[in-house]
Amino acid sequence: MGFFDTIRCESPLPDECKPDGIEFQTKSLRRGLCNYAITAQGRLVLEKAWGNSTAENPIDTEYHGDVLFCGATGTGENYVARFTNGQLEWIKLAKDRKPPVIPDYDD
């Protein structure tokens, strides 16, 4: 187990099985129970940080890199979204791809 973030995807997914707008889980970002969205315009925005109320204006993260995400129940397909200089390049099925192992530190 461990902390994760939630991603709502407004961009089209590569398969027809999943509707747009469904929520997913990821450990590719802050892992702080934050809420993100991949907008229809292809931006990754922070909608709510843990402990804060929902932002009136989501914050564009200008993310650069890959984000691996899966169904909120841990079942279903895994996806990877590639962002370059803040812009979504593509979303693909993430076959045989696992999230990076990031150790949890107890201070």
Image (cartoon, grey):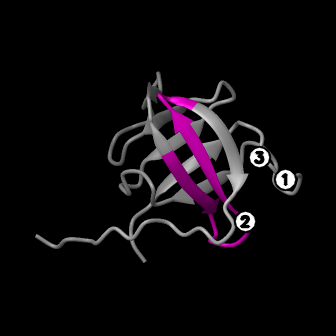
Q: Which residue is drawn at 69% across and 67% down?
A: 95
Residue 72 vertical placement versus 35 (above, below): below
Horizontally, is 95 left or right of 3 in the view?
Answer: right
Q: How many labels does the image show?
A: 3
Along the line of sight, the residue nearer the viewer: 82 or 3: 82
Label 1: which secondary element: loop
Task: Give the extent of the magenta segment.
Answer: 66-87
The image position of residue 68, as x and y in percent, is: 56, 56
Of the 4 image quadrants, the one containing the N terminus is: bottom left
> Farthest bottom residue?
1
Residue 5 vertical placement versus 38 (above, below): below
Label 2: which secondary element: loop
Horizontally, is 11 left or right of 89 in the view?
Answer: right
Of the 4 image quadrants, the one containing the C terminus is: bottom left
Q: Are marks 1 and 2 in contact (CB under 8 Å)?
A: yes
State the mark number for residue 15: 1
Horizontally, is 97 left or right of 102 in the view?
Answer: right
The image position of residue 47, as x and y in percent, is: 48, 35
Q: Do the residues labelled 1 and 3 touch (CB within 8 Å)?
A: yes
State the mark number for residue 77: 2
State the mark number for residue 13: 3
Q: Is the magenta stretch mostly helix, strand or loop?
A: strand
Gap in Å between the C-alphas at discs 1 and 3? Answer: 6 Å
- Indicate which disc, 3 or 2, sits on the residue closer to the N terminus: 3
Q: Report if residue 68 lies within the magenta region.
A: yes
Q: Residue at x 35, y 55 (%)?
A: 32
Identify which amino acid the numbered label 2 is placed on. Glu
Q: Which residue is drawn at 35% across and 48% down?
A: 50
Identify which amino acid the numbered label 3 is placed on. Leu
Quarter residue 37 falls in: top right
